[in-house]
Image (cartoon, helix red, strand yellow):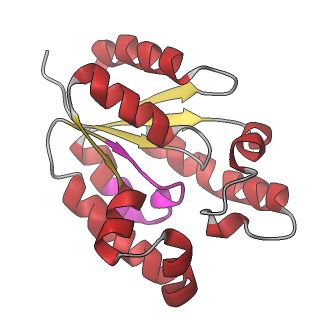
């Protein structure tokens, strides 16, 4: 079986980074996380980039990294939650690999992100409303690019990885 690159999309707190690391280890593929690559290249964390450059500056950096990394073969790539907002990113993701949408509910996102200060979009008075608004905008875009959709709510990351391996064989 020839493995194409696997790109994980979904909202913050869906488990993209955790599942991506586990999946890459299981499949013997190199793992990348767009947010980590951006932080390494900037020498600064995501909240700092948002503070200094705004969301547009961050999204410009993200677009460059997505274009570059999606050209690699046989990798697992975890993307940021907002990656689907730019048509160029959606085009690169869908045309250069298998896209997996890790879907989760807003309630589960709140549980998983409640203590994480590295999420600039949630540093507000009503994170639940922000997550609901983001979900309504982004969910159709995640579905648009996805080859597979996997629900991650209340599921162990290792179970998700095993389910993904089974389902990837079907489309590989």
Which picture quadrant has residue 164? top left
- Establish if 5 lies above or below 35: above
Q: Is residue 90 magenta?
A: yes
Q: Residue at x 44, y 73 (%)?
A: 59
Q: Which sits in the foreground, 154 or 98? A: 154
Q: Return the x and y of residue 90 as percentages of the image width and height.
A: 38, 55
Answer with left or right where residue 117 lies relative to residue 32: right
Q: Which sits in the foreground, 109 or 147? A: 109
Q: Which residues are magenta?
A: 77-91
Please say whether residue 172 is visible from this viewpoint: no
Which picture quadrant has residue 50? bottom right
Q: Residue at x 53, y 60 (%)?
A: 82
Q: Is residue 158 magenta?
A: no
Q: Return the x and y of residue 6 as percentages of the image width and height.
A: 30, 35
Quadrant for the C terminus in the image: top left
- Establish if 165 lies above or below 60: above
Q: Residue at x 19, y 32 (%)?
A: 4
Which picture quadrant has residue 38? bottom left
Answer with left or right where residue 162 lies relative to residue 152: left
């Amino acid at each position: 079986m020839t493995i194409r690159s696997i790109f994980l999309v979904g909202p913050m707190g869906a488990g993209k980074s955790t599942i991506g690391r586990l999946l890459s280890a299981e499949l013997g593929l190199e793992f990348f996380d767009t947010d980590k690559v951006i932080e390494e290249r900037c020498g600064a964390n995501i909240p700092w980039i948002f503070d200094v450059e705004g969301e547009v500056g961050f999204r410009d950096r993200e677009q460059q990294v997505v274009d570059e990394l999606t050209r690699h073969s046989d990798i697992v790539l975890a993307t940021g939650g907002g990656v689907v907002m730019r048509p160029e990113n959606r085009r690169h993701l869908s045309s250069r690999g298998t896209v997996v949408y890790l879907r989760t509910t807003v309630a589960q996102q709140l549980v998983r992100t409640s203590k994480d200060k590295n999420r600039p979009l949630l540093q507000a008075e009503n994170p639940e409303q922000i997550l609901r608004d983001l979900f309504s905008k982004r969910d159709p875009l995640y579905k648009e690019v996805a080859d597979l959709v996997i629900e991650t709510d209340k599921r162990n990351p290792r179970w998700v990885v095993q389910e993904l391996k089974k389902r990837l064989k079907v489309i590989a």
